[in-house]
């Protein structure tokens, strides 16, 4: 018979062990530049995504998920820290370096007994800190036979296709983890980042598909000087060789950089497929509008063929959870680091506060907590992911985190949610997108451009969902614009964005020129 003290200690141990086991496992699948328009759950007609849609059937689809700064590295920093870019210090991809000493939701989970891992694209300059394990692509990484950085400081090349390899490594880590502890795994995919290189089995997948041109593909950008200034159009900015693999010679520098690292089998498939496409392109001898529309079709085929591996490997991970009896106690989130343009306004890329860029696909499965096949229309931000995961794990959210858990919104229909969200984009160079900040409540959107373009823009998303007409100077909206400006000012103060506050104050003392 056990002594009372021994029995008490045994009961405490059993209680703690049971508590640890009850904590949910967490999987975050983070894709890159994956447009919500390319996910089946968002009623798209461009392609099928059965595995990502499985999360929609078995969980919740967020119809108003947004990012606070639509650019790769900054979005990851926001997710990790639960803080806006001006607070976590990683504002842009041009000059920022992530301060890995600051707190993250990963570090908080680690304190609570979680095993934590980040595998795949990281893109925050400094190597990860505070993880049990990490294995990352250097910088943007490569699609074929990519190099990986390891925790021991080494760099090794792995033969294969990046999306498949990242899933292989994720499953390998899951196989080797301590099964007695809960885990949080972030799977960071490179796909669908530019340049678009499909897996060899996906080359030509959409060649028989004719994609309809977006209605605003030949947008004239009237009333929107910032949109007119950009350098991200499929017409003028998308390169035939770099982006679309239309090479005139085998020694083309873009071909050499990407194809040069392929093995003979990969190169043979690549050359066989793209040579035929190029020969057909030359025969057509296109120009003018016909050339622009050909580039659009080619872009869509490249982009969606590259995205196909995302869905396939998402399915692999969900199957892994099933086979290892992990599904019922694992919270899974699929999210992109931001939205992306698929020809809307004639564009590719992201950066803007406009819908296709700032809005991101986000789906969550949490068995026993979230009802299957549900949709949520509350505003949810990438800023909120960390606090949500901490909330699910029963870990207090640090006071410095600015995000808010959206778990109550999907487990308790009485949750209030955000009335509006604040956005701030900083980069001054790439694609000539003017820095800007703004506020949106889902119906009305107010944007203040600065640096390159010094303008206000205002949109009524109910009447103008494609954001074609800036109505800032329309007197009919004067009262609503005033309300939105007050809302913007309040959020700037709430999130302590002193740069934006100074710009607002200066604009109050100086009348802006009317929009042209």
Image: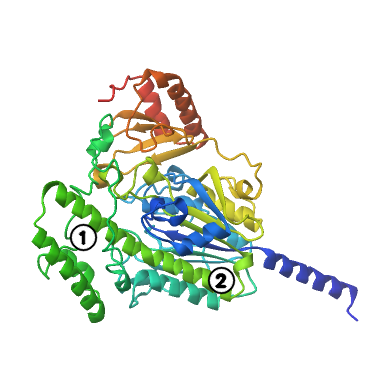
Give whichever of 300, 472 is nearer the camera: 300
The residue carrying pointer 1 sits among few (fewer than 14), some (14 to 19) or many (20 or more) residues within 10 Å by Cα, namely many
Identify the residue at image location x=20%, y=50%: 293
Give whichever of 342, 165 is nearer the camera: 342
Residue 373: x percent and y percent? Answer: 57, 55
Give whichever of 211, 180 is nearer the camera: 211
Q: Is residue 186 visible?
A: yes
Residue 336: x percent and y percent? Answer: 43, 55
Q: Is residue 106 visible?
A: no
Q: Quadrant of the C terminus?
A: top left
The residue that mark 1 highlights is: 244
Mark number for residue 321?
Answer: 2
Classify 199 as above or below 416. below
Give whichever of 123, 374 is nearer the camera: 374
Classify 510 as above or below 165. above
Identify the residue at image location x=18%, y=47%: 236
Residue 426: x percent and y percent? Answer: 35, 42
């Amino acid at each position: 018979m056990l002594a009372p003290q021994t029995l008490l200690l045994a009961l405490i141990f059993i209680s703690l062990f049971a508590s640890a086991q009850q904590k949910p496992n967490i999987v975050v699948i983070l894709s890159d530049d994956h447009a919500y328009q390319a996910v089946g759950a968002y009623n798209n007609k461009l392609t099928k995504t059965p595995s990502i849609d499985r999360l929609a059937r078995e969980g919740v689809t967020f119809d108003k998920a947004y990012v606070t700064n639509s650019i790769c590295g900054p979005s990851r920093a926001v997710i990790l820290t639960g803080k806006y870019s001006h607070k976590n210090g990683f504002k842009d991809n041009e000059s920022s370096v992530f301060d890995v000493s600051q707190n993250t939701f990963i570090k908080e989970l680690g304190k609570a007994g979680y095993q934590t891992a980040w595998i795949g694209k990281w893109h925050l300059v400094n190597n990860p800190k505070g993880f049990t394990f990490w294995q990352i692509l250097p910088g943007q990484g490569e699609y074929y036979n990519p190099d990986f950085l390891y925790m021991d400081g080494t760099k090794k090349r792995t033969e294969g296709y990046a999306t498949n390899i990242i899933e292989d490594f994720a499953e390998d880590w899951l196989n080797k983890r301590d099964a007695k502890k809960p885990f949080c795994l972030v799977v960071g995919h490179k796909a669908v980042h530019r340049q678009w290189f499909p897996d060899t089995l996906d080359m030509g997948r959409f060649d028989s598909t004719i994609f309809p041109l977006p209605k605003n593909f030949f947008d004239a950008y009237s009333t929107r000087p910032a949109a007119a200034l950009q350098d991200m159009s499929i017409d003028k900015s998308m390169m035939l060789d770099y982006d679309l693999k239309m090479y005139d010679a085998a020694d083309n520098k873009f071909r050499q950089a990407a194809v040069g690292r392929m093995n003979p089998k990969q190169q043979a498939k690549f050359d066989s497929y793209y040579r035929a496409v190029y020969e057909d392109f030359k025969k057509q001898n296109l120009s003018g509008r016909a050339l622009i529309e050909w580039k659009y079709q080619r872009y869509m085929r490249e982009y969606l063929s590259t995205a196909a591996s995302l869905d396939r490997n998402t399915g692999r991970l969900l199957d892994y959870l099933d086979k290892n009896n992990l599904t019922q106690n694992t919270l899974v989130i699929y999210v992109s680091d931001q939205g992306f343009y698929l020809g809307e306004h004639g564009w590719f890329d992201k950066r803007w506060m406009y819908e296709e860029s700032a809005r991101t696909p986000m789906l969550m499965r949490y068995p026993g907590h979230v009802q299957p096949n549900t949709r949520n229309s509350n505003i949810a931000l990438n800023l909120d992911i960390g606090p949500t995961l901490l909330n699910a794990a029963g870990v207090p959210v640090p006071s410095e985190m600015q995000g808010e858990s959206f778990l109550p919104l999907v487990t308790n229909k009485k949750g209030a949610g955000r009335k509006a969200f604040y956005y701030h984009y900083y980069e001054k160079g790439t694609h000539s997108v003017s820095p800007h900040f703004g506020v949106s409540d889902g119906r009305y959107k107010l944007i203040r451009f600065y640096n390159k373009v010094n303008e206000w823009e205002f949109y009524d998303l109910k009447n103008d969902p494609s954001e074609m007409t800036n109505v800032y100077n329309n007197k009919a909206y004067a009262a609503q614009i005033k309300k939105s400006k007050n809302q913007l000012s309040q959020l700037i103060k709430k999130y302590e964005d002193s740069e934006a506050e100074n710009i607002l104050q200066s604009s109050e003392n100086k009348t802006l020129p009317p929009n042209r």
